[in-house]
Image (cartoon, rainbow, N blue to C red):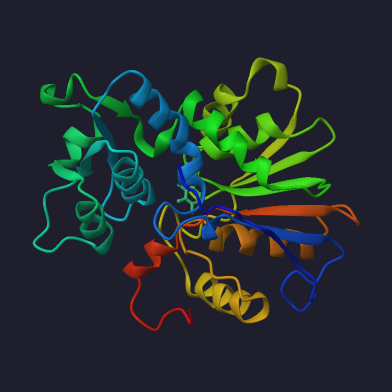
Amino acid sequence: MLDTFSPAAIRIDRPGHVFGASVDISVLRLDEVHPVISGNKWFKLRYYIDEAKNTGKKNIVTFGGAWSNHIVATAAACRMNGLTSTGLIRGEEPAQLSPTLEQARQYGMKLVFLSRVAYSEKHVPAEFDNDYLIPEGGYGPTGAMGAATILDHSSGNYTHYCCAVGTGTMMAGIINASSPQQQVTGISVMKNNRQLDDTVGDLVLAENKSRSWQLLHDYHFGGYAKYEPSLLQFMNDFYRETGIPSDFVYTGKLFYAVNDLAGKGYFPHGSRLLLIHSGGLQGNASLRKGTLMF
Ligand SMILES: *Cc1c(COP(=O)(O)O)cnc(C)c1O
């Protein structure tokens, strides 16, 4: 589906004050996969798109908010695959579309705005009955199966995989693709989302139930898409030291968390970590200009 696609794991080998602990850190740059279908979204979408095409569906319908990485990625992926798309968007139609929705529309996505109540009920209007539905955020076994292929692009011998967690689809895929000696550490970007253990666990295949994984809930910075000045400061410091940009909803919280955990000795001496840079940089456009240095 994407012909120019070669993400590389880059090593962070300048132990400065960021990641200054005795662990070896690499970052898998999925943010460089594609300018729009960035990060984990292409992986989560790939088998949904295949299934839609194989079952003769013409239009894909999915859910998301005004800044949703999933919405814009779905719009672009459908366009590239000769499918049309409809985004069921949370909230009333605004006077001015967010850059995310503007871009989705440019990729041909039809936007249908649902009231917050209708949205929370995830009711799909009857006119889309014959279309192919992708759940919000790509959550589901098909999404996890695609996410598992993320690790096809990592060749190192890692002790830990670390990723940010929203719906848990990506993390479940990585757990399914991990081997028994490896650990998968997920950083929840939501506040007190204690259901996550179940939502991730539900997508872990029966043969992988004994894999080692843990979710950490202390790095949400106030909740989904919330932040504090210390997070933005860290993201700028991290960029200055590594040249790697991050987003404030997911990957900024991941890098902050791993840095903090490494400093506290959470990872055993000599651990080799692969951090999944899952993309999402377009969402930074919702911040005031100049907040981030990249
Ligand atoms: C969607 C997204 C995630 C979360 O993936 P889930 O599979 O929903 O847990 C993480 N990082 C970025 C940048 C994302 O856009």
Residue drawn where x is 52% and y is 35% of the image: 169
* 259 w.r.t. 169: above or below: below
| Closer to us: 119 or 53 | 53
Q: Is residue 278 above or below residue 195?
A: below
Residue in the picture at 84% in, 47% down: 157
Number of numbered discs on residues: 0
Q: Residue at x 61, y 34 (%)?
A: 148
- Kindly give the residue lying farthest to the top in the view shown: 206
Residue 43: x percent and y percent?
51, 40
Relative to 91, 217 lies left or right: right
Q: Depth check: 91 or 7 in front?
A: 7
Residue 217 at x, y percent in the picture: 59, 47
Where residue 277 sits, quadrant-wise, is bottom right
Say if residue 157 shows up in the picture. Answer: yes
Residue sitting at 23 percent across and 41 percent down? 87
Residue 23 sits in which quadrant? bottom right
Q: Position of residue 123 (x, y in %)?
A: 20, 26
In the picture as drawn, the residue positioned furthest to the right comes out as 269
Which residue is most to the front? 3
The N terminus sits in image quarter: top left
Can residue 264 be spotted in the picture?
no
- Left or right, 217 with reference to 78: right
Task: Please state the horizontal and vertical placement of residue 141, each as a whole percent of the image.
Answer: 50, 24
